[in-house]
């Protein structure tokens, strides 16, 4: 499981002041959002929903990219590119803070140490009640993750944040105040300027976008004895690969998180054997393979084995 066969991070990324591929991507996403919301009444509803969900999920992938130091060497500029809350519910600052903690790989999947873990401690599991446990078990299937998963994710996050703010955390209050300004701007554009019904934006854009994001994260991590073997690879998925900015090749991202999205496919092809050795062969042949295995079957026991 040694990572010595992978080249160092410094040799993989050229020193560039601006990564224009990512700048063009950001322009495409924001331009596409403005265009779709402006012309939505001229398009079939299914097209509006399909493109709307795609753009929200794509924007989430862009936010992930800027969190890791792209497209410029100035993180304030990067944060400004990713800050606008198109998804409404997730403040960028909180996402950035939690995701960087998630990259402490020795704690991957730990429900206490890893903010992005889908597992539960024994105390949390027993405190959920029978209905909550059934919901959590359904959420470990792919169908559950795509249908009820976004609701569970958003509601749980907002409930936790409400508790933090109610306790008087001034930093969190400031984050949510700034975030509310961005949300107001997005909704003013969508609802007041473009005359789109709020329900259509919430369901067709926000919820569908969250479901696509849950597809990416569904099989990314699974508990194993060594933390290198807790990160998966989903191959052979050009369309979703572009949507997720090749974060589906997830073990490579965790090994070399500073590599920009457009360099990942070629780098993965060159070092596939080493990467599979690192993660113990945890690889899926596309999301069709993930669906074949887990559409109605749990991906794993939601109770974390080290907290059971």
Image (cartoon, rainbow, N blue to C red):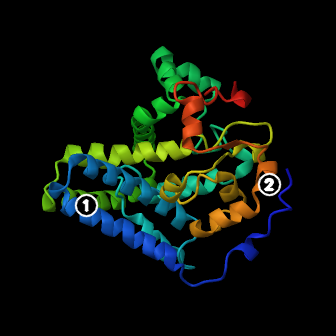
In the rendering, which numbered label is found on residue 36? Answer: 1
**SS under mark 1:** helix
Q: Distance of mark 2 from mark 1, alpha carbons?
A: 42 Å
Would residue 122 appear left or right of 22 to someone viewing this image?
right
**Picture disc at residue 188:** none
What residue is drawn where x is 71% and y is 73%?
12
Q: Residue at x 58, y 55 (%)?
A: 247
| x, y percent for residue 51 | 33, 54
State whether residue 136 appears in this view: yes
Q: Residue furthest top?
A: 130
Q: Which mark is in front, 2 or 1?
A: 2
87 shown above or below 142: below
Q: Quadrant of residue 269?
A: bottom right
**Image point (39%, 48%), residue name:** 209
Question: Who comes first in sequence, dot 2 or dot 1?
Answer: 1
Q: Secondary structure at mark 2?
A: helix
Between 194 and 112, the residue placed more toward the observer is 194
- Residue 84 in percent (x, y) is at 36, 64
Location of the C terminus (image quadrant): top right
Name the residue tied to disc 2. 273
For the question of whether residue 189 can be seen, the reply is: no
**Residue that appears at 36% across and 44% down:** 208
User: In the rendered view, would you say 113 is above or below 21?
Assistant: above
Residue 113 % position (x, y) = 65, 43
Instruction: Answer few, some or many: residues within 10 Å of disc 2's Cα (few below 14, many 20 plus, some between 14 and 19).
Output: few
């Amino acid at each position: 499981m040694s990572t010595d066969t992978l080249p160092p991070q410094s040799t993989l990324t050229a020193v560039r002041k601006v990564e224009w591929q990512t700048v063009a991507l950001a322009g495409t996403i924001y331009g596409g959002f403005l265009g779709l919301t402006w012309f939505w009444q001229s398009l079939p509803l299914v097209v509006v929903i399909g493109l709307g969900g795609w753009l929200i999920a794509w924007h989430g992938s862009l936010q992930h990219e800027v969190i890791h130091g792209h497209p410029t060497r100035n993180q304030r500029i990067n944060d400004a590119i990713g800050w606008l809350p198109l998804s409404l519910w997730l403040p960028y600052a909180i996402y950035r803070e939690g995701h960087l903690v998630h990259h402490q790989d020795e704690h991957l999947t730990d429900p206490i140490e890893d903010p992005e873990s889908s597992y539960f401690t024994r105390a949390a599991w027993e405190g959920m009640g029978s209905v909550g446990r059934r919901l959590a078990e359904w959420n470990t299937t792919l169908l559950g993750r795509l249908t009820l998963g976004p609701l569970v994710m958003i509601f749980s996050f907002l409930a936790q944040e409400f508790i933090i703010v109610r306790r008087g955390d001034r930093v969190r209050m400031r984050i949510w105040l700034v975030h509310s300004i961005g949300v107001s701007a997005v909704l003013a554009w969508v609802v007041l300027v473009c005359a789109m019904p709020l329900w259509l934006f919430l369901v067709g854009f926000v919820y569908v976008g969250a479901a696509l994001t849950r597809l990416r994260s569904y099989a990314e991590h699974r508990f194993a004895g060594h933390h290198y073997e807790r990160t998966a690879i989903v191959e052979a998925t050009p369309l979703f690969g572009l949507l997720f900015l090749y974060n589906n090749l997830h073990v490579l991202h965790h090994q070399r998180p500073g590599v920009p999205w457009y360099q990942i496919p070629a780098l993965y092809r060159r070092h596939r054997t080493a990467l599979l050795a690192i993660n113990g062969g945890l690889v899926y042949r596309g999301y069709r393979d993930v669906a074949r295995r887990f559409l109605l079957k749990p991906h794993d026991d939601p109770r974390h084995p080290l907290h059971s």
